[in-house]
Image: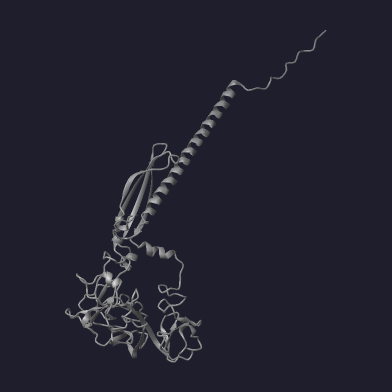
Amino acid sequence: MRGTPFKLQGRSAGVSLVEALVALAVMSFGMLALIGVQSTMRINTDLSRQTTEAARIASEDLESLRLFNDVRTVPGQFTPSWAELTGAAGVVTLPSNTGNVTFTLNRQLTAFPTRPADMVARNMLAAQANIAQTTVTWKDRTDETRTVRLQGVVAAAAPALSGLLMLPPFSGETARRNNRHVSIPVNARDLGNGRSAYKPSASSMVVWVFNNLTGQISQRCTAVSAAQADITADLVAECPAIGNGSLVSGHVLFHLANPPLGGFTAAQAENPQGIPTGETPALATTPLGIDFLTRVGLASPFTECFSSAAYISTATTSPRPNAIAYDCLVFSESTSGWGGKLDVAVSVSGWSVTTNPAADETARRYRVCRYTRATTAYTANRDHPKTYCKTEADACTTISRVTHNLPNQNFLVLAANGICPTDSDDSTATGQDSFINANTLSHQPS
């Protein structure tokens, strides 16, 4: 019998050794690449953290330069002044658990080599601001040197003045805003119609009406008996227009003691002491006025002046009054403005204005100085020059005339045997505030 032929079965499925080795190699390369990525990510993360820490160190160092309490050197103060700021170099010490590297800091301070346009406009010297550069270096995990460098400007600005920028606006004597022109007196009553009414003297019936936008005095009333707080728009509605009135205001201060050895200093100009105890002349019945000489562009009656409560020389309480505030309405002929010399009119029996060096306080002879930032007689109007819109060439054109209000036109009355005290940015007079410019120049007699 014939048997059935035997059929071979199909070959079984499987992986050869070569295939296994190839797969293992591919997997190995993938694992190596993954390990490499993780290592790179670790290095980059570490570098990012180190860079952030270096930037923080550099930023804190720059900010520390602005923590000075005074511009000039003050002996014994806890923090350095602006004048004492210097460069620095050294290793930065960090808490033991906040880093795996060592940071090195280097700080350099250099004065402005030139004055930018805004510094020139403000008459700032290059030495009044420093360029600060802080560099922080370290070595990362790969032993490569890394650097973070920050720069900033540290200006010689009084911290007290900078701090005022953080305060909310207020309606005080130094602000005079109230949504109207800055030169309008703070206690002028806003009438709600774009005008403000101001009574320059409580004992007078005169009222000046200001334009809130321009600050100019547009009307003058002569029969308003109401108190300042009670003035209404109806009371001044029919007041005559005066056209181009402007305000000149300020204070007249007194320091009538005999000058000390070495003469008067800026400290006396900053804090005048008034009339000495026992001195009899008083200004109780004679207000001060402003006399315009060599008038230019003024219309009759030229000026109208009022002063504050009279000076009381016999006061025994402390502190004794030492100043009189004044307000003057200037009648200008046109919008072209006015010019002239403003003099203090002291009309007290027995008083005279002189520069006689032999005079003393008992003779009641005095001189008048004017407070000014200037160092020469004729400067910009805001510096309180000797003569408004008058130049060294004795010329007064319509371009240089005064067309705006002039607040803070202040005077200092001294004994005639003294000299008008001067002040400078580097003055260190005893009792003097370094933030106040108390410079004065001789004003009367001419």
Residue 341 visible to the viewer? no
Left or right: where does residue 320 sit relative to residue 172? left
Left or right: where does residue 4 sit relative to residue 102? right
The location of residue 37, given as percent across then percent down, is 50, 36
Instruction: Depth check: give the residue in front, 293 or 291.
Output: 291
Q: Residue at x 42, y 75 (%)?
A: 176
* Residue 256 quadrant: bottom left
Q: Is residue 426 above or below residue 417?
A: above
Q: Residue at x 83, y 7 (%)?
A: 1
Instruction: Depth check: give the residue in front, 366 or 326.
Output: 366
Residue 14 visible to the viewer? yes
Q: Residue furthest top?
A: 1
The location of residue 179, given as percent across then percent down, is 47, 75
Q: Quadrant of the C terminus?
A: bottom left
Q: Residue at x 42, y 37 (%)?
A: 141
Number of residue marks: 0
Q: Residue at x 41, y 39 (%)?
A: 101
The location of residue 194, given as percent across then percent down, is 48, 82
